[in-house]
Each structure stands twice: as C-alpha cells, then as structure tokens.
Image: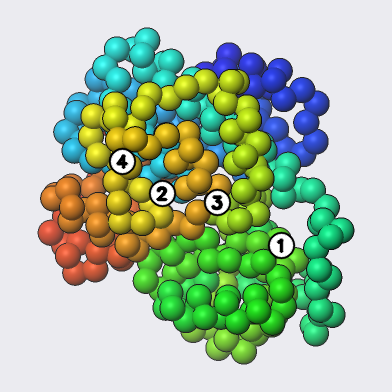
Amino acid sequence: MFRTLDMLVEHLGPTPGPAPPAGGRLRRWLAAPGAAPPGAADDSVAAGVCVHLLQLCDLQPQRTELDRVSAVLGHSIGLQAAIVAGLRPRRTDDFLALAETSLRLVALSLVRAHQVTARPPDPAEPPHPADRSHAADPARADTGEPGSRPAPMAAVSGLSRSDLAALVDGYRRESRRPVSVSLVNTPTTGVLSGRTGDLLHFRAHHEPVFRDGTVRWAFLANTVPFHSPHLAPAAEQVRRERGFVGTLPPAAALRIPVYAADAPRTLPPDADLIDEFLDQVLVRPVDWAVASVHAVTDAGITTVLDCGPGPAARRFTRECLGAGARALRFTSIRRPSGRP
C-alpha cells in the first residue's frame, strides 16, 4: 500500500492543494505515535486515504468474522470497502492486487474532487443576488455548533427529510445557490453540500429555523462537498484516468450481494464497479434511511458488523431501523483490544 501511494504521488506530480501522503511519510506516521504533524489528516484527501487503508486491513482474508458475512453495505466512501468485501478474494496475492486498485481509485478520486472544488467560480455562472446578511463573511457568521468551522458540508438534525428538502428547494429557487441535500442519514438527520459560503448564507437565511435549538446545525470536518453535482467533473476526470487506476473485477464476480447506498437496490451483475464508486461517492446523494432498512430486511440480517472507523454508521442504522433494531445484534469488527 505504501508503494501504491508513492506511485500515485508520482502520477499526480506537483499538485496544488491537499495531496495523499507519500508511502514513506505515512509509514513514519504509523510507526511512531505522534510522528504526524498537527493537522496532517485534517483534509478529506489524507483522511479518506487513512479510512480506506484501515478498512482494507480489516478486510484481509482469513478473518473468521468476515467468513460469516452474507451481504454488505457501505456508507459514503465505505461503499468501496463493501465492494472489496463483496468480492471476497481468498488468496493473499489476489487480495493485495484488489487492494492496490481500490486504493488508487479512492485516493485519486479524493484528489480530483478537491481540485475541482478549489477552482474559482465559473465567470459564466449567473451572479448571486446581493446578500441580505453577514453570512458571506465567515469571520462574522454563526456556524452553529460550538467549535464548528465553516466547511462545504453541514449536518442538520431535527427536521424531517421532507421539511429539509423543502427548505433547500425553496432556497435554491430564491438564491440560485447550488446547495443540495447530500445525505439522509436518519429520518431526522440530513447533510447539506455546497460551497462553504453558500452554506453559511443558507444558515443565515434560515436563522429563525435554528434559533430555539430544536433544529441543530453543525459543519462537518470534510473539505470536499461529497455526494453533490459539484463533483461531477471530478468523476469524469477519474474516468479519463482509468488506465492509472487499473481494473476492478466485473460486478458479476461479487460473491455476496453489495447494496447501494443511494437507493434500495443491489449492485446489478452488469454494473461497472468503478462507475458505481464514482457516482455514489462523489455525485449521488446517500439515502441511508432507505438503503439500510432495505439491506437488512432483504438479506434477512441478524447481526450488523460495523467496520468503522467510529460508530456513526452503526448509530444511523439503529435509528433508521427503529424498534426493529432490538432484534438485531450490533457489533464492531474492532474490539477494544484492537483485535477482531
């Protein structure tokens, strides 16, 4: 994996903005606690690379718990981990070849997504109406939760999905700012994506909605607006670089069902797995509230095994399943000791 990252850094050449850590650098970070400088993984490129590497480590063959897995579903970038799990290579060399391709796809996509969103606005884009608040000034704007720094993604909790969609639709018509609902994590928790300034303006525009604390707003740590039309050019750029990424097996080679996170469906046998990743992670919104319920009921799941990192997807799934979750066993692939 370290060699794969070195190859990616060489492929990218001088890269403005965040870039994946070189293999030798990441090796030092992992070998010596505290070796990584403060903020080394604060951007979505480095953070996403580390997340995917962690999941690949957990998905290595001969893990007894994984032998009992009967279907897989991944939240956001976790879709790629789900695809790797669904292919279930048994030989170590086959797994490592798959892991290298998977890491190249994830890391390159993160870099291109950052580059696309860092570009200045298109001069041909219609000008925005004059701001009616101080929201365009991040230094003066109310960002919601304490410690929440302005970013291109923000979580909104306390509104139904239909009410949040109505707020966004009305705002887009009035302001012509491309804010979108990028994730529905639970029936009352959604995530918005857009330019940071547009999200600040959205919150200020709807200040009465957030005033009493019933509806809460918190910017996420992401530095890329995932699951939004903003990243369509990044997806197309990665498609042009498929020669570097390599090939994934056809979806027909999946040994267990892999469920999509954008709708209640399994990946069909004729699906292109690279296209599915690019579309579902970069462009299409996640509907975890629908997808998780469908996956659990469709596959007759009795145990939910969470690959992390962190408990967020497990928590979302519990809330989405509601009372039915009591019949399920929830567990994590990572034990407190650090061993599965």
Query: What's the mark number on residue 268?
Result: 4
Query: What's the mark number on residue 283?
Result: 3
Q: Position of residue 152 (x, y in %)?
A: 66, 58
Instruction: Estimate how packed mark 4 is, as few (under 14), some (14 to 19) or many (20 or more) residues with alpha carbons within 10 Å.
Output: some
The residue to which callout 1 is attached is: 196
Between label 4 and label 2, give the one nearer the viewer.
4
- Above or below, comparing residue 88 to residue 123 in the picture: above
Q: CA distance from mark 4 to mark 3?
A: 19 Å
Figure quadrant of residue 18: top right
The residue to which callout 2 is attached is: 75
Q: Residue at x 38, y 24 (%)?
A: 249
Decide which of tag 4 and tag 3 comes sooner along the chain. Answer: 4
Query: What's the mark number on residue 182?
Result: none
Q: Residue at x 67, y 59 (%)?
A: 151
**Image quadrant occupied by the C terminus:** top left
Q: CA distance from mark 2 to mark 1?
A: 23 Å
Residue 174 is left or right of residue 57, and the answer is: right
Front-lying residue, 296 or 315: 296
Q: CA distance from mark 2 to mark 3?
A: 14 Å
Instruction: Estimate how packed mark 2 is, as few (under 14), some (14 to 19) or many (20 or more) residues with alpha carbons within 10 Å.
Output: many
Residue at far right of view: 123
Under circle 1, the secondary element is helix
Q: CA distance from mark 3 to mark 1?
A: 17 Å
| Amino acid carrying mark 4 in the image | Pro
- Above or below, comparing residue 231 to residue 183 in the picture: above
Is the C-beta separation of discs 2 and 3 under 8 Å?
A: no
